[in-house]
């Protein structure tokens, strides 16, 4: 199979802080390996991405249908940059409804390639649901994080356990992660608002408790990191997962 025929499908969450690193990775893959890149996103985001691509790039931009107003979002709300903070979780919740359309998109891609499957799917860490879709279709799947392994390890551990809500830590400004002692103590002021306010029953907690376990269906995780500088985070994730890093 010629290298140019190998297709990498990429699907970031609808936020500039996610799309930009995905696009940077896509350009690196295209330049280094000469693979075909299929970059998936909602219509308004695809329009913006199109204008930012170098003229020499052959990255294929593919729209996936999305109607934010059907999920209680203002019209034309396809990116966090046009939403107030309280509505970002609603966009995340709405993104899970893209699953059938994404599966159909991959199936159509396979059909148009005479049964040849994509080399891999690189999906956003908020799109855990793409892992079982890829598994069902027999396509290699990885999650991509624009952060390093240490930060993602802390993020994963805190969301699943919410240690700052543990009665044992009541009244404390600092806490440890029971399954990641090597991270040392974390101060409550280091937590983003959605985590500091989380109590296990809020919308963010419900979303993450459904999303994070789906990572276990992934075949691997990509980080924007250097292994020699990120050994603690990589060690934690290797010990708490079955996928390749």
Image (cartoon, rainbow, N blue to C red):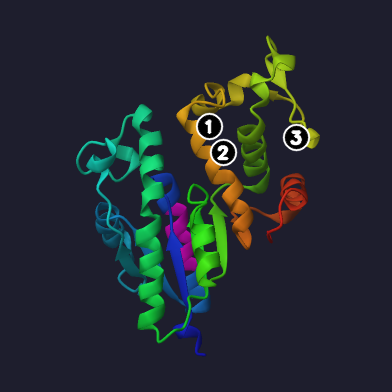
Q: Which residue is mark 1?
A: 205
The residue under the point 41% across, 48% down is 96
Q: Residue furthest bottom?
A: 1
- Given contact means CB atoms under 8 Å apart, are the residues at marks 2 and 1 in contact? yes
Q: Residue furthest left?
A: 75
CA gap between label 3 and label 2 equals 22 Å
State left or right for residue 86 relative to residue 34. Answer: left
Dot 2 falls on a residue whose secondary structure is helix
Q: Which residue is mark 2?
A: 209
Nearer-N-terminus badge (3/2): 3
Q: Is residue 14 visible?
A: no
Task: Point out residue 119 in the picture as x, y percentages from the top left corner.
Answer: 52, 75
- Given contact means CB atoms under 8 Å apart, are the residues at marks 3 and 1 in contact? no
Task: Point out residue 99 in the picture as x, y percentages from the top left corner.
Answer: 40, 56
The residue under the point 78% across, 50% down is 239
- Which segment is the magenta one? 20-28
Q: Which residue is mark 3?
A: 183
Q: Is residue 178 visible?
A: yes
* Placement of 27 over or under 184, stated as above or below: below
Query: Magenta stretch mostly in which secondary structure?
Result: helix
Q: Nearer the viewer, mark 3 or mark 1?
A: 1
The residue under the point 75% across, 16% down is 168
Quarter of the image for residue 182 reads top right
The residue under the point 54% across, 55% down is 144
């Amino acid at each position: 199979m010629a290298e140019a025929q190998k297709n990498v499908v990429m699907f970031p969450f609808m936020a500039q802080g996610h799309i930009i690193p995905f696009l940077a990775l896509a350009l690196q893959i295209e330049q280094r390996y000469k693979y075909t890149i299929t970059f998936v996103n909602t219509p308004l985001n695809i329009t913006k991405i199109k204008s930012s691509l170098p003229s020499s790039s052959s990255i294929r931009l593919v729209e996936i249908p999305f109607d934010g107003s059907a999920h209680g979002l203002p019209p034309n709300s396809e990116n966090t940059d046009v939403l107030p903070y309280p509505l970002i979780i609603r966009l995340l919740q709405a993104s899970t409804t893209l699953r059938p359309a994404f599966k159909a998109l991959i199936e159509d891609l396979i059909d148009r390639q005479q049964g040849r499957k994509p080399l891999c799917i690189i999906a956003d860490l908020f799109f855990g649901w793409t892992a079982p879709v890829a598994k069902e279709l027999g396509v290699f799947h990885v999650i991509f994080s624009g952060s390093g392994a240490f930060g993602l390890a802390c993020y994963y551990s805190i969301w699943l356990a919410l240690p700052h809500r543990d009665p044992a830590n009541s009244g404390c400004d600092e806490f440890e992660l029971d399954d990641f002692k090597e991270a040392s103590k974390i101060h409550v002021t280091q937590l983003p608002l959605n985590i500091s306010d989380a109590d296990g029953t809020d919308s963010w907690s419900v979303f993450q408790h459904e999303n994070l376990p789906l990572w276990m269906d992934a075949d691997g995780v990509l980080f924007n990191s250097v292994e020699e500088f990120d050994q603690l985070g990589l060690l934690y994730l290797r010990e708490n997962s079955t996928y390749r890093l």
